[in-house]
Image: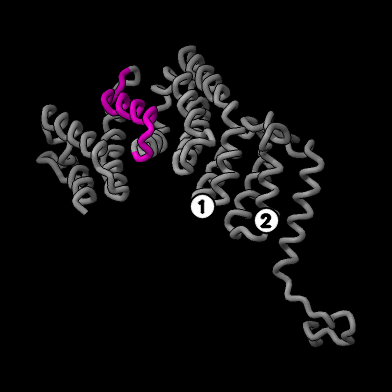
């Protein structure tokens, strides 16, 4: 509870004499801010209770977001944090790895310019953490980090001013960096498949991230829709067809495919996958039929009880 209260206390706004709001954090001198940041990283490193670790991580991310907003684009707002999470994600300590990947997820929109300068290392780390020899929690977190950065880089690229040469160059770098993560798709699909067998709630979070990718960057998975060890479309339709899975999981898989099919950024991409389209259509009809309370004697009935009386 102390971690929750600290987060609220640091960033609760109070009025200054001139009437403008200010937070407790803004009122601290630089040396106190640095000491707080160092202690938080120390506690994050040593805390082994997952729930407490999560609350400390939330404080760290809140401070990091504030610092990034206040920092010029060409500077790293909290270099010690970035150095620390890159170190942690390369260890074999599951809690540290998951924590580092979750920080990447939480800060993704703000970290895009920084990650662009380390995209090869970032790709290598995600590739390593989605291998089958990794714990399922690590694979799930790595999947989410990859998905969030794919969407964030695409959004960041679209925000650039096309009339400004520097912005145009940055947009190009974003798109190139994003496409450099395409080789991760087979690992993302195999991770989803394996996690689905053990933790459907975690798998649902991964499916939600896939829907985000289908919305923001539908072409990203084009080369893996029907090819590879775990192709995208057959896995999604398998999930949709699986009556043993929860409705949420099945609905998210269907939403992913329909989002790709409807997205104007990649028209016709799904339509070309004729066998998958047939399977999906059959699946949708079967799902509709699941909810029908059938009366076996309906075809022998002479009167329609539901017919409106005239």
Residue 189: x and y in percent read 60, 38
* Closest to the observer, 196 or 68: 196
Query: Is 196 placed left or right of 296 in the picture?
Result: left
Residue 184: x and y in percent read 57, 29
Whether residue 123 is situated above or below residue 187 in the rendered picture: above
Which residue is labeled 1 in the image?
A: 199
* Closest to the observer, 2 or 244: 244
Q: CA distance from mark 1 to mark 2?
A: 15 Å
Query: Is 169 placed left or right of 100 in the picture?
Result: right
In contact (CB < 8 Å): disc 1 and disc 2: no
* Closest to the observer, 177 or 157: 177
Which residue is painted at 22% across and 54% down in the image? 1
**Magenta segment boundaries in residue numbering:** 75-95
Which residue is painted at 38% across and 30% down in the image? 89
Q: Secondary structure at mark 2?
A: loop
Residue 280: x and y in percent read 75, 50
Query: Is 241 placed left or right of 129 in the picture?
Result: right
Q: Quadrant of the C terminus?
A: bottom right
Which residue is painted at 75% across and 61% down in the image? 286
Hey, which quadrant is residue 46 in on the image?
top left
Whether residue 217 is situated above or below residue 302 in the rendered picture: above
Q: Secondary structure at mark 1?
A: loop
Which residue is painted at 31% across and 30% down in the image? 69
Answer whether residue 91 is magenta in the image: yes
Query: Is 31 placed left or right of 124 in the picture?
Result: left
Chosen colour scheme: one colour
> On residue 242, which mark appears?
2
Residue 254: x and y in percent read 66, 50
Looking at the image, the residue that sits furthest to the top is 165
């Amino acid at each position: 509870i102390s971690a929750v209260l600290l987060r609220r206390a640091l960033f609760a706004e109070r009025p200054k004499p001139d009437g403008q709001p200010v937070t407790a954090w803004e009122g601290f001198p630089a040396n106190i801010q640095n000491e707080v940041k160092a202690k938080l990283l120390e506690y994050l490193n040593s805390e082994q209770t997952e729930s407490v670790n999560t609350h400390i991580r939330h404080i760290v991310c809140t401070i990091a977001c504030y610092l990034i907003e206040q920092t010029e684009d060409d500077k790293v707002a909290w270099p010690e944090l970035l150095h620390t999470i890159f170190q942690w994600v390369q260890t074999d300590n599951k809690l540290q790895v998951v924590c580092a990947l979750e920080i990447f997820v939480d800060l993704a929109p703000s970290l895009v310019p920084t990650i662009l300068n380390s995209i090869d290392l970032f790709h290598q780390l995600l590739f390593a953490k989605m291998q089958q020899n990794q714990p399922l929690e690590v694979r799930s977190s790595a999947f989410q980090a990859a998905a969030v950065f794919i969407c964030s880089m695409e959004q960041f690229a679209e925000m650039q001013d096309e009339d400004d040469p520097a912005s145009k160059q940055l947009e190009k770098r974003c798109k190139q960096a994003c496409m450099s993560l395409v080789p991760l798709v087979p690992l993302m699909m195999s991770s989803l498949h394996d996690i689905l067998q053990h933790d459907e709630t975690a798998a649902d979070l991964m499916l939600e991230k896939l829907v985000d990718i289908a919305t923001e960057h539908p072409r990203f998975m084009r080369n893996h829709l029907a090819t590879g060890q775990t192709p995208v479309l057959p896995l999604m339709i398998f999930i949709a067809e699986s009556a043993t899975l929860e409705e949420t999981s099945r609905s998210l898989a269907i939403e992913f495919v329909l989002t790709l099919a409807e997205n104007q950024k990649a028209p016709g991409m799904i339509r070309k996958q004729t066998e998958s389209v047939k399977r999906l259509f059959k699946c949708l009809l079967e799902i509709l039929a699941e909810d029908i309370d059938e009366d076996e004697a309906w075809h022998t009935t002479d009167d329609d009880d539901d017919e409106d009386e005239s």
